[in-house]
Image: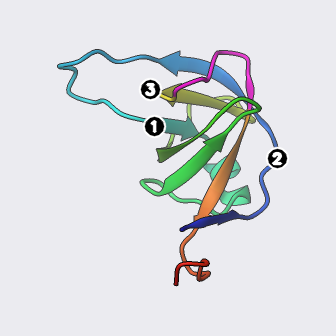
């Protein structure tokens, strides 16, 4: 079982994309500025955890220079809503879990 680690200041959801069946690009994704990604030690294309007060879900990270600092855009992340505060956490695959 993977753990999550790292420094993760809160971010505000500034946009939300909900896709439909048949859309070419679908599935959980989070977009953020390169500076915000660097603080969290995550890179473009990496699998990260999006965590809010109500829900947590894995999503693919996409770096986007056009976003405001401290803001993220989410796609198909269940339970998230615009203006919500979330944390983006790095997936720790190096630490052995209890099943190792």
Rendered residue at 56%/67% (across/down)? 2
Disc 3 vs disc 2: Cβ atoms closer than 8 Å? no
Q: Nearer the viewer, mark 3 or mark 2?
A: 3
Instruction: Identify residue for label 3.
Output: 76
Secondary structure category for the residue under label 1: strand
Q: CA distance from mark 3 to mark 2?
A: 22 Å
Q: Position of residue 92 (x, y in %)?
A: 60, 70
Q: Residues within 10 Å of mark 1 (few under 14, many from 20)?
A: many
**Residue lying furthest front:** 99
Secondary structure category for the residue under label 2: loop
Disc 1 vs disc 3: Cβ atoms closer than 8 Å? yes
Q: Position of residue 7 (x, y in %)?
A: 79, 60
Instruction: Identify residue for label 1.
Output: 29
Foreground of the two, 33 or 8: 8
Upstream in sequence: badge 2 or badge 1 = 2
Q: CA distance from mark 2 to mark 1?
A: 19 Å
Q: Is residue 73 above or below residue 58?
A: above
Foreground of the two, 50 or 15: 50
Rendered residue at 67%/24% (across/down)? 13
Q: Residues within 10 Å of mark 2 (few under 14, many from 20)?
A: few
Upstream in sequence: badge 1 or badge 3 = 1
Foreground of the two, 53 or 71: 53
- The residue segment tinted magenta is 78-85
Residue 85 got which mark? Answer: none
Residue 9 got which mark? Answer: 2
Q: Position of residue 15 (x, y in %)?
A: 58, 18
Quadrant of the rendering where the N terminus is positioned: bottom right
Foreground of the two, 76 or 17: 76
Q: Is residue 11 above or below residue 89?
A: above
Upstream in sequence: badge 3 or badge 2 = 2
Q: CA distance from mark 1 to mark 3?
A: 7 Å
Rendered residue at 69%/29% (across/down)? 68
């Amino acid at each position: 079982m993977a753990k999550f680690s790292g420094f993760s200041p809160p971010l505000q959801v500034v946009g939300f994309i909900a896709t439909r069946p048949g859309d070419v690009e679908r599935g959980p994704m989070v977009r953020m500025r390169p500076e915000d990604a660097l603080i969290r030690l995550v890179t473009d294309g990496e699998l990260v955890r999006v965590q809010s007060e109500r829900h947590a879900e894995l999503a693919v990270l996409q770096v986007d220079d056009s976003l405001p600092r401290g803001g993220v855009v989410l796609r198909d992340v269940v339970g998230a809503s615009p203006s919500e505060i979330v944390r983006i956490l790095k997936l720790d695959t190096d630490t052995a879990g209890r099943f190792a």
